[in-house]
Image (cartoon, helix red, strand yellow):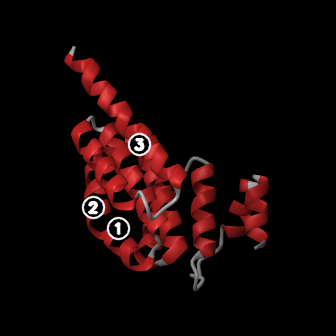
Amino acid sequence: EYIEEIFKRGEFTKIKDILEDFTPKSEDLKGEYYKAKVLKQLGNNKAALSLFDEIIKHGTGEIYFDSLLEKIDILKNEKSLLNRNIKKLIGDIKGTYLKRLNIVGEKYMVVAILYDLGELYEKINSFDKSQETYRDTIKEFELETDFKTIEELKKHYNKLNDKKETSRI
């Protein structure tokens, strides 16, 4: 909890110093998670990705979900990492990650990852796949999950429709 508080205050260098010699894995992987977040905040995305991958491999529930979101965020926003990893990430999301979330996660977690999957398709200009992902997610989860998230998915879906219409003119 101490590290969590320092993180919230934005004292990333202090956390990095505390966690520098941190090697033992905590049972809930929280220490590793915060170490990875600090590395990300300090711009060391490759090291953060490596640690998030380890957490994804061994974690469950909330820590698994949060680490997966962090990994996707890094890959979506880091140009040097995006190009060579995005198709693999899409395959991993559609395969292993979603299957595990359906078992150990909650519906809002699945929706959030599907939302990111649609955005990843947009990043590689696969607008049909993106639209299909949004449409299928809306159809499957509209009545079961957070209304705000579904509304955001609908906005993305409609925005893509508008793009397609504009490009046909």
- Where is residue 114 shown, x and y percent of the image? 37, 56
Of residue 24 and residue 77, the one placed in the foreground of this image is 77
Give the spatial CA distance, label 3 vs label 1: 23 Å
The residue to which callout 1 is attached is 97
- Element at label 3: helix
Residue occupying image coordinates x 73% and y 66%: 4
Q: Which residue bears the numbered disc 2? A: 94
Tell me whether circle 1 and circle 2 mark residues in contact (CB < 8 Å). Answer: yes
Circle 1 — which element?
helix
Q: Which of marks 3 and 1 is in front?
A: 3
Given the image, on which type of amino acid does mark 2 rest? Lys
Q: Which amino acid does label 3 sit on?
A: Lys
What secondary structure is found at the residue carrying circle 2?
A: helix
The amino acid on which the numbered mark 1 sits, given as a three-letter code, is: Tyr
Query: Vertically, is 108 above or below 73?
Result: below
Name the residue that disc number 3 marks.
154
- The percent coordinates of residue 154 (x first, y second) are 41, 42
Residue found 20% across the figure and 19% down from its top: 168
Can residue 78 be spotted in the picture? no
- Crowding at dot 3, Cα within 10 Å, few <14 / some 14-19 / many 20+, comes out as some
